[in-house]
Image: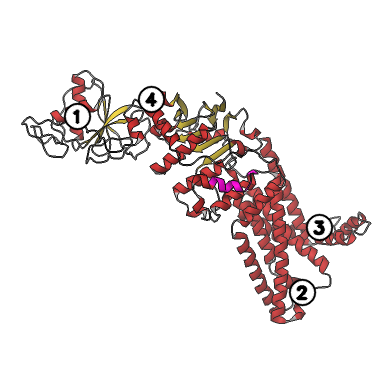
Amino acid sequence: MLRVIQAIGLTSNPRKELPPAVDDVSFEARAGRVTALLGAPGAGKTTALRLMLELQQGRGITYFRGRPLHRIAHPSREVGVLLGEVPGHPARTVRGHLRMLCAAAGVPARRADEVLEVVGLVSLRDERLDTLSRGMDRRLGLACVLLADPHTLVLDDPADGLSTRECQWLYGMLRAHAAQGGTVLLTTADPKAAARTADRVVTLEQGRLVADLEAAEFSRTRLRPRVAVRTPHASRLAALLAKEARTAQRSIEVVRENGNRLSVYGSTCADVGETAFRHGILVHQLADEIGDMGPGAQENITTELRSDQVRQTPGGELPAARGGREHAGVTPSEPDGGPAPADDRSAEPEAPPTADGDPVTDAGQEASAEAPQAPMDEPRPADALADERPPAQAAGTRAATCAVDALPDLPPPISVRPAPSPLRPLRYELRRAAGVGTGFLTGAAVLVVSAVAAVLLARVGHTPQPRLLAAWPRELPLPPAALGAGLLGAIAFGDEFRHPALAADRGTVPRRLGLLLAKLLVASATALVLAFLTVGCNAEVLYLVYGRELAEVPADWLALSASWTGLVVGCAWAGVLAAGLFRSTTAGLAAVVAVPIVVVPLVQKALEGPSVRTAAGFPLRLREVLLSQWPFGGERYVAAVARVIAQPVGGALTLSLTALLCAYLLTTLRSRVR
C-alpha cells in the first residue's frame, strides 16, 4: 500500500532545561486509511503536526507522497490542513471567505458553492464568520480543507467541543475521503474515539512514540474492559471486591472515580453483582465498558459517556464524569484486614433492591445486581450492538457504521487544475479588499475629513490653492488622502497576519512576489481613486460654499497632479511594504507617518549640512541628467517625475520605499533559503 505520509525522526527544539515536546517520533500514514495520533493533552500531538508541516523549528523530516512540504509547488492542493479555528476576517461572509480562498488556490469560484452544499452551510453562506457556532465553524473548516481537492487531510483534534451527532458526521466525512483513496491524519485525546474511527492508532506519551497499532489490535491490547458500578456504598463495595479477590487468588483492580462510581478491571458484571447481592449493597448502575489504558495513562479523555457506550439499568442514572481517580483496592498481594468502611452502618446486610427499587425479602425471592437487557422491541443503535462484541470486532463495526452513515458525499474532484496564472494573486487581492467594508469606510472617512478641512482652510485664508484642494494644512505632515491611502496599504498586509486566511498550509503569510505585486497594484489603484475623489469632492464643496474663485484649476495642474498622485501612491506603497515587513498594520501606518516627520529632516540635513562639499543644486542637476536621457518628446513627463522626486517629501518617500522594498526582498530570499 502506498505510504503517503512518512514522518521520520521528528524532534522539537528543547525549551531551556525542559525535555523536547516531541522526541524522535517516526510513523507512517497510508493512502485509503484514517490514522489517529492519540495522546493526552501535552503529549506532543500538535507539536508533531507542526513539525510535519514545517511550522516549527526542529529536527526530522516528513514526506508527503515522496516530497517534503517545502518542495511542493502548491501545498494546499496536496495537503489540506486544519489547526484550531478557521482563520479569517470575522466580518467576512462564509461564501466570500471561500471564494477568496478559491482565487488564492486557483480553482473556479463555483467550487465554493459545491463545498458549501456538501458541508451543509448553504443556508448560512451570507452569515459573518464571527456569528458561527462551534459546530458550524468546524464545518466551514472542513470546507476550507476540501476546497482545493487535496489528497491528504491533516486535522488537529477536529471533534473537540462537538456534539455526538456532529462528531458522527465529521468522522463520516473523513471516512468517505479515505474510502476514495485519500489519506487522513487526525489527532485525538479519546482512545475510544480513536479505536472507533481510525484504521491505525499511533500513541504518543510525553513526546515519545509508545504504540503504533492497527485499530483492532489497539482495542485488544491498549483498551481494557472494565465494569462500571454506581452505588452509594462505593467504598464498602470496593473493599469487599478487593478482599474476595485476595481470598480467591485473583488479580483485579478497583479504581474509585468521582462521587459514588467505581471502575473494576479484571472482573465481570456477574461477579460484581453477586458480591453486591450477598452483602446487601444497593447498586444503581452496573455495566460493561471499554476503558482506557489504566490509571495515569490518559487523564483527560472524554468525560461525556454516551448511550452507545454504557448499558444502564431501567430508571438508572447516567454515570458521573470521570476525573479525580482514586484507587480503592488492588491485587491479591494486598494484606487482609482493616477496619470496616465508614458507610457500613449496620452489621446485618441490607435487603437488596429489585429493579423497581423495592427491597427483597428472604421468602425465596432472588435479585441480580446486573442490569437487565433492553427490551427486544426497543430500537438500539448499531454502536450499542458493537459494544457487546469483542473490542476488535466492535471497532470494525463502528468504523463501518460511520462510513455507511456519512450524511453527504464528498464534493466532486477537480479534474482540470489550471496552471499558475499571474492573475490569480490579483483576483485574490481584489476579493480580499472588497470582501469587508473596511476599505469603503476608510475612503468615506477620508472624503468627509478632507471636505471639512478644505472648508476650514478656506475660511481661515492664507492657504495656497494646491494645498486647499488637497486639504493639506502646513501644520500636518501629510494630507488626509495620503494618510488614508497609507492606512489601506497597511491593512492589505496587516489583515493577512491578523486573520491569516492564507496561512493554513504554511503557518504564516507566504512571501511570494506575485502576492506583493498584486497588493501594490491594488493599493495603487485604490490610492489613485482616493486621490482624485478627494480633489474632486474638495473642489465641489469649495464651489458650493465660497463660489467659483476657490475651485479653479491651477495653471500648472500637470505637475501638481503628478506630485499629488506620486505622494498618495507612495504612501500606499510604504504602508504595504512596511506592514509586510514588520507584520503589523500599526507598523505600516507608522512607517507612512515617519516619512515626513523623520526621514525628510534627515535627508535635508544630509544634503544641506556643513561640510567641505555641499549638495546645493542637487535637484536641478538631477532634472538635467534625467532630461538628457529623453531627447524625443518625453521630457515633460520626466520633468514632472523629477520634480516630484526632487521635493523633500518626494525624495524622502522614494528613499523609504527603496529601503523597504530591499528589506522585504531580503527577508523573502532568506525564507526561501531556509
Report how far apart the C-alphas of labels 1 and 3 lie in the structure: 97 Å
Sooner in the amino-acid sequence: mark 2 or mark 4: 4
Secondary structure, magenta segment, majority class = helix
Which of the numbered marks, if any, corresponds to residue 465? 2
- The image shows residue 284, relative to residue 485, as above or below, that is above
Report how far apart the C-alphas of labels 3 and 2 lie in the structure: 29 Å
Q: Residue at 48% of width from left, 45% of height from top?
A: 138
Judging from the image, what secondary structure is the residue with disc 2 in? Answer: helix
Nearer the camera: disc 2 or disc 1: 1
Sooner in the amino-acid sequence: mark 4 or mark 3: 4
- Disc 3 marks a residue whose amino acid type is Leu
Disc 3 and disc 2 in contact, CB within 8 angstroms: no
- Residue 277 location, x and y as percent? 15, 30
Badge 4 is on which residue?
A: 392
Sooner in the amino-acid sequence: mark 2 or mark 1: 1
Sooner in the amino-acid sequence: mark 4 or mark 1: 1
As drawn, is 38 to the left or to the right of 371?
right
Q: Name which quarter of the figure residue 262 lies in.
A: top left
Report how far apart the C-alphas of labels 4 and 3 lie in the structure: 82 Å
Q: Residues within 10 Å of mark 1 (few under 14, many from 20)?
A: some
Badge 3 is on which residue?
A: 607
- Residue 113 shows in the view: yes
- Magenta highlight on residue 612: no
- Residue 487 location, x and y as percent? 64, 59
